[in-house]
Amino acid sequence: MSDIQQELLGQVVAAQKNNEPLALLGSGSKRFLLPSECDSGQTVDLTRHHGVVSYEPTELVITARGGTPLAEINELLNEHNQMLPFDPPMFDGKGTVAGAVAMGLAGPGRPWRGAPRDAILGIKLLDGEGRIVEFGGQVMKNVAGYDITRLMCGAMGTLGVLLEVSIRLIPKARVERTLRTGMGYDESRQLMNSMRSQSVPLTGAFWYKDQLHLRLSAASETALNKLQQRVGGEWLADNRVWQQLRDQQHEFFTPADSQSLWRISTPPAAEVPQQEQHLLDWGGAQHWIIAQGDWREPLNAIASAARGHAQPWFSTPKIASTGNEVIKQLQVNLEEVFNRNRIFNPGCCNG
């Protein structure tokens, strides 16, 4: 464990006094998602501020310093058969708890187990004025400041340094298996849509190359076998495919140098035409599409028609996100409160 809170405070106070930007950095595993402007300024290495502050398995709550590696947290929770409900990605096997919250990313179980903002109970924040403030708490009934904690999810570090984060946990399922069945794009979408209104122990559903994968989590095998009889298909020997999908180690996530990878988020039942290189995740709510070159206009049009939004994930050269004017203004208003001088990750969060 390492507590460098006072050192971080000194860096922020000096940066504010000199009006100098700070680049907040954890493991760097998600740096490719940020605009190049985020690299400006003095680097603040949060990995040196790490360690589990408290963990109460019986209360299903953990509090950790911002630079604590996700791998360390997952290992500890696994000993007690518990997990982070939003199952954050660990690109290249890396990631910190503050980075997971700041980027607001969730794994394949997002529609069923929730996003980071649904699990964050409280935070300790170092803001742009050099103030250390706390919001929320360690139990769900302690709601004071609860909405403030949610604002940190997806803010990309622009609202302050996450010194500590308290997270609600969930028990792991007693039985968890993966069913794979051959099925086309449209038929898979219809099946996933129908399952949302039924009592199915589903915690993951993705389609790729006419193969539908369903992750089923239950207390016993009985419910799982009933679904197999209905859908058909075969049980996989293990559940590694979900970690590969979460961490983008799946074979789909290997576009050529001339191609770009896009993420389109939509309501799960929205109509999105099948593309040549297409992976459908989150039970129909998240589309990964590999496009040739800059497909910004057609993909934005597809997303808009489906009442969703398109985001360039990575490309060579990098394609900038067009953003959303309403979100941009909200970001400006929030920074007026938490980061008035725009010293934290300037240019990172453009809507």
Image: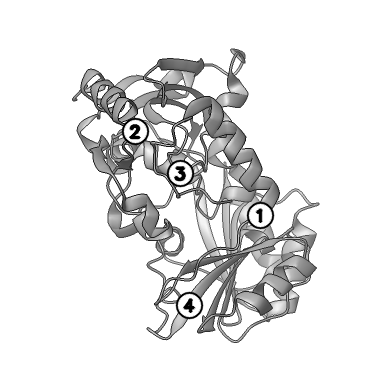
Counting from the top left corner in percent of width and height, residue 335 is at 53, 33
User: What element does badge 1 sit on?
Assistant: loop
Count residues near mark 1 (Cα–Cα under 10 Å), then give few for <14, some for 14-19, many for 20+.
few
Distance from label 2 to label 1 (Cα)? 28 Å
Q: CA distance from mark 4 to mark 1?
A: 21 Å
Based on the displayed image, in which of its 4 quarters is residue 140 positioned?
top right
Query: Which numbered circle lies on residue 324?
Result: 1
- Image depth: mark 4 or mark 1 in front: 1
Name the element at disc 4.
strand
Side of 274 relative to 351 (left or right): right
The residue labelled by disc 4 is 260
Q: Residues within 10 Å of mark 2 (few under 14, many from 20)?
A: few
Asked if residue 200 lies left or right of residue 131, the reply is: right
Asked if one can make out residue 308 in the rendered structure from this viewpoint, the answer is yes
Q: Amino acid at mark 2?
A: Asn
Q: Classify 316 as above or below 310.
A: below
Whether residue 10 sits left or right of residue 254 in the image: it is: left
Answer with left or right where residue 204 lies relative to residue 196: left
Q: Residues within 10 Å of mark 3 (few under 14, many from 20)?
A: many
Q: Is label 2 in contact with label 3 (beta carbons under 8 Å)?
A: no
Q: Earlier in the sequence, mark 2 or mark 1?
A: 2
Q: Earlier in the sequence, mark 4 or mark 2?
A: 2
Foreground: disc 2 or disc 1: 2
Task: Please tell me whether residue 285 is drawn above or below residue 134 in the rendered image.
Answer: below
Q: Give the spatial CA distance, label 4 vs label 2.
A: 36 Å
| Amino acid at the residue labelled 1 | Asn
How far apart are labels 2 and 3 at the CA level? 20 Å
- What SS does tag 3 mark? loop
| Residue, disc 3 | 156
Residue at the spot of label 2? 19
